[in-house]
Image (spheres, rainbow, N blue to C red):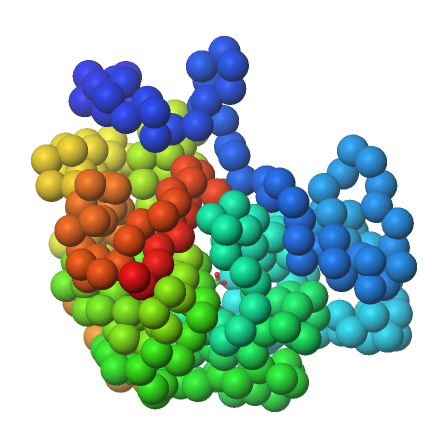
Amino acid sequence: MFPEFQSFLASRRQEIAHNEEGEFRETSEPDTSLASAKIMEQLGIARQPGITAHDQLSKWLLAASQAEREEAGLGLPIPASPVHFIPGQYNIYYDFKNTDIALDELQKAGVDIKGTLLDFGCSSGRNLAVLQKAFGEQLDLFGVDPATASIEWVNRHIPGVVAKVSLQEPPLPFDDGMFDLIIAKSIWTHFSEAAGKRWFSEMRRVMKKGGHFLFSVHGPHDIASRIIKDVPLPKYERFAGHEKWTRDTFLLDLVKTYERDGFYFQPFKQVGNQGDLRLIEDAVTDDWGLTFISPEYLRSMLPDDISIIQRSIGRTGNRHDVYVVRRD
Ligand SMILES: C[S@@+](CC[C@H](N)C(=O)[O-])C[C@H]1O[C@@H](n2cnc3c(N)ncnc32)[C@H](O)[C@@H]1O
């Protein structure tokens, strides 16, 4: 292994999840399964021991007929292209696992799951649909995304959720102080530094005082996974000017820059090569790519009256660090 990788893994050891033998560990299982357990309770499905609620519910859904799914209020199919959708382990529409993890993190941070909630970069609503089913009575749900087809799909298929097309740049079409809760999963994993800062300020504007914001970033746990497990392997041909990159040249550049600057960003080359931006009319790529942020640097990107109240390593999306912050 390159000495740069060794020293990165050693110096960032506290930020990489290990098992008792000190080996790299995936940490991305929900602890409380808040949404999945609530939905199973609504449906009268008894919890089985030895299996997480999100796994059990996903398997139940896969085995159910379409009529049974519809009767359960879980009848949505995987959206067809051009609507954006990221398949999970079970290849079903509903993202029970990551919604459970997000709710775990909010609960751990002492946040009440109620009021107005915005899913920023909601895609075709796979988390909003789970939130609506489990907590629709106590949450007013909103979503935004610049991909028009995804937003149209959400508005057509998830009654009770208000979805709006946003621009790639602020502002959002919402009043100041509108939201108690904001979630943004796999969004700051893609923003350039300038766009990341602009959007943090915009999140602050639309949050209530005392409101909370949960978002995910690529941090040391994700970098360790790339070094130790080769997961995920980026598609190097997507990066502007770096078509000839190999695993090692990319990782060396990433580790050196991350340790020096606390921030690493590679823009995607062109709109057509990137799954998300391909779907956005007149999309520009300068501010959207692959992004890594250290906790030290993250603080400097946030407005002064936003406090970091919790950071958990390697959570949503299998490897992302998840932050919960509050507007003071
Ligand atoms: C990796 S996906 C994550 C989607 C969703 N949060 C999830 O976890 O399934 C990134 C999403 O960000 C959206 N996006 C791209 N640029 C954006 C921007 N400037 N503001 C908000 N969302 C953006 C894309 O259209 C896409 O739906």
Query: Is residue 283 in view?
Result: no
Instruction: Locate residue 209 relative to residue 127 in the image: left or right.
Output: left
Which residue is rendered at x = 26% and y = 59% of the image?
306
Instruction: Locate residue 266 relative to residue 115 in the image: left or right.
Output: left
Image height of 170 relative to 200, above or below: below
Which residue is rendered at x = 76% and y = 61% of the image?
39
Image height of 300 relative to 74, above or below: above
Instruction: Locate residue 91 relative to residue 8 in the image: left or right.
Output: right
Image height of 52 relative to 17, above or below: below
Picture quadrant of residue 17 = top left
Which residue is rendered at x = 62% and y = 41% of the image?
31
In this view, the residue in front, 122 or 137, is 137
In this view, the residue in front, 60 or 41, is 41
* Percent position of residue 204, x then y: 28, 69
In this view, the residue in front, 123 or 29, is 29
For the image, the number of numbered tags is: 0
* Percent position of residue 268, x then y: 24, 60
Specify the farthest residue to the top.
21
Which residue is rendered at x = 31% and y = 82% of the image?
176
* Percent position of residue 48, x then y: 85, 41
Where is the N terminus found, in terms of image quarters? top left
Where is the C terminus found, in terms of image quarters? bottom left
In this view, the residue in front, 168 or 79, is 168
* Percent position of residue 273, x then y: 32, 65
